[in-house]
Image: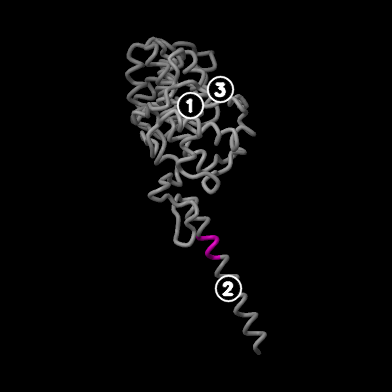
Amino acid sequence: MAKRKKGFFIKIVVVLAGILIVIAAVNFKKGRVIPGFTASAPSKDDPVPVKRSSWEFAGIEPPFEVTEKVIEEGGAIYQKNCAVCHGRYGRKTDHPFAVHGLHHVNADYVWFVTRGKAGTAMPSFKKKLSYKDRWKAVLYIHARLAGREPMRMANGTMPAYLPPEFSPSDYFKLGEWYFNKNEFVDAAIYYKLAYDSNPKNAIAANNLALALFYAGKTGRAADIISKLAKSASLQQVWLTYGFIEKDIDPSVARKAFRRAIELGPRTAMGLAAKRYLEQIK
């Protein structure tokens, strides 16, 4: 009888443990941390959130004064923990530019170092490195490997660490790179930089609108593309205009698709506009 009770008790414990694990997994996916599973929870001394969207481009500053000593300490941390994958000089990367660290603001990189990056070999360093040491490593990357001033922070909307020698074509190339990876927020940032650097670049503005649309910023996307269409004679702009407006204002979308067809009925864009036009009739 005692053995049966013991076996029954063990089964109950196993079932309860399984339920807790499932609940923890569901809550983690939703970006929440429940009591008893606090390993990834942000704290006062380590405020990095579970979700990147609530952290990136927020102008978060390091928890200490940035000095040459801090940069040197960051170098030692980087070489010990990061160089094995990213290279001693930060050049092991598939990024279109050789030096690791040319994009993203400091706080965004701190998030990656803290949480790791899904779908890549980048692990979480939350348990291995303190919050301050993660900051030091990131500041070293920007100050030494990318050669930029480490004290400058994000302004809330744009990355702070972009070298002045970048050209509009470089920004556009970065936008394309991120867009092709379906990272539409980052793509929009660089398309905007390309357009701001060269307001005559209608394709950059067009792609900015499309990236914002895919990033869920439909209103901003529609505003940009509608203003662009007022003076644009590019078929691509009118196709994008119709594509963005088709679920907002079908009548506007129809006009845009018709204009795109007029500009080249037999081109790939013209044929695409025709298909979209037929879908909203």
What is the secondary structure assignment of the residue under circle 1? helix
Label number found at residue 71: none
Tell which circle, 2 or 1, labels the residue nearer the N-terminal end: 2
Given residues 173 and 94, the one toward you in this image is: 94
Report the magenta residues as a range. 19-23
Q: Is residue 281 visible?
A: no
Q: Main secondary structure of the magenta part?
A: helix
Which class describes the residues within 10 Å of circle 3: few (<14), some (14-19), or many (20+)? many
Badges 1 and 3: C-beta atoms under 8 Å apart? no
- Disc 2 residue type (three-letter): Val
Badges 3 and 2: C-beta atoms under 8 Å apart? no
Cα–Cα gap, marks 2 and 1: 50 Å
Is residue 171 positioned above or below 104 on the image?
above
Residue under label 1: 142
Q: Is residue 260 magenta?
A: no
Residue at 55% x, 61% y is 21
